[in-house]
Image (cartoon, helix red, strand yellow):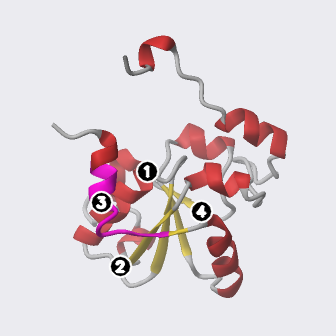
Amino acid sequence: MKTFEQLINEALEDVEEIFPWDLAEALEEKPDLMLLDVREPYEYDAMHIRNALNVPRGILETACEYDYEETIPELVNAREREIIVICRSGKRSVLVAQVMQQLGYRNVKSLKTGMRGWSDDDQEMVDREGKPVDEDSAIEYFTPRLRPEQMSK
């Protein structure tokens, strides 16, 4: 059996990561850069990077292919585009980037530290209505809330 962290570390052998400050710079230089947010819709609605495409992890593979209800043509046709995958902490995005590579995406990277790192770097985030999210709300949102039964023994 492997742990989640072991899966992430194995995927990192194949996946390149980009730091939030490097992504901010890349967005200025490459306006057509595809941002793929793989968090759940409620996470995306709370706060996300402007213009990011939300495709939850659970439907990724079918969103990347034609002939499925979840098909997203823009994503299907992006196999040659530079894509940055985003999640909350930078872990789900690593797994997604690895799967996308297996599906033939040639230039896919993961946002190291995810939205938490993006927030910590004081980068702009917007809610589902496109309104800016203030720093205090972001800090509150990204503060872990583990219950005792969720902690390892």
Residue 32 rendering spot, x and y as whole percentages: 59, 82
Image quadrant holding the C terminus, namely top left
Q: How many marks?
A: 4
Q: Earlier in the sequence, mark 4 or mark 2?
A: 4
In primary-sequence order, the first of circles 3 and 4 is: 3
Circle 3 packing at 10 Å, graded few (<14), some (14-19), many (20+), is some
Residue corresponding to mark 4: 52
Q: Quadrant of the N terminus?
A: top left
Disc number at residue 91? 1
- Find numbered disc 4 in the image and state the secondary structure of the residue it sits on: loop
| Residue 9, horizontal then vertical, whole percent | 32, 55
Question: For mark 2, does the 10 Å Cα neighbourhood hold few (<14), some (14 to 19), or many (20 or more) residues?
Answer: some
Identify the mark nearer the N-term, 1 or 3: 3
Q: Is residue 143 visible?
A: yes
Residue type marked 4? Ala
Q: Amino acid at mark 1?
A: Lys
Q: Alpha carbon of mark 1 to alpha carbon of mark 2: how far?
A: 21 Å
